[in-house]
Amino acid sequence: MSTIAVLGNGRVGGNLAAALTRAGHEVRVAGRAPGAAADAARAARIVINATPGAGSLERLAALREELRGKILVDVSNATVDGPDGLPADLIYPGSSLAEHLQDALPGTRVVKTLNTMLFSVMTAPDTLAKAPDAFLSGEDPQAKHIVRELLGSLGWHPEWITDLGGIRTARATEAAILFVPHVIRTGGFAPFAISIAR
């Protein structure tokens, strides 16, 4: 079991923190209080970025020293929202939030995952009618192995987890967020995930 800091206490962060606690991990959730994120990150082995993607880079770059040597699991998507509050465009077209985080945090091992699904599926993948996919992007094989085990504790079967390769591959999964508003408008907020049919 791991010591985990969850940065962000909204629906995504709260859902992940509760599920990881149930799975036996020691979890600290950092709210908006001054210094809370730094204190939580300093004490953790794994840090999960569940902050709103539009502000993630600035928030996490300020934690460079606290995040040094840690694994940063980035589940956020950096988007420009439309009038209805749903994602309308990418903030980093031709790149990705994950790449910018890795550039800003060279002493941190960034792994992108769980960003291609409605937040409820992150911790309950077996509730879908068909097996979903979780994708991993990152430069460090050991970090991805640890994140794979972390996903296993959330109910992800090994065969549902696909390692896409280096951090640049996060461009593909982050771009998948552009499906989301259309899926929600046609089917509502029912749980869904992007998966690869083989």
Image: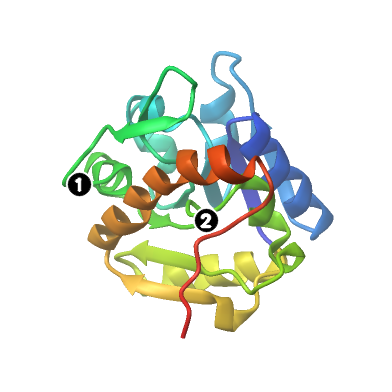
For label 2, the residue is 114
Viewer-side residue, 85 vs 173: 85
Q: Is residue 108 visible?
A: no
Q: Is residue 97 left or right of residue 25?
A: left
Name the residue: 52% across, 74% down: 161
Looking at the rendered structure, the secondary structure element under dot 1 is: loop
The percent coordinates of residue 16 (x first, y second) are 68, 47
Residue 67 picture quarter: top left
Q: Is residue 50 left or right of residue 165?
A: right
Q: Is residue 62 above or below residue 107?
A: above
Q: Earlier in the sequence, mark 1 or mark 2?
A: 1
Residue at the far left in the pictured view: 94
The percent coordinates of residue 60 (x first, y second) are 39, 32
Name the residue: 51% across, 29% down: 38
Quarter of the figure that contains the N terminus: bottom right
Name the residue: 74% across, 56% down: 25
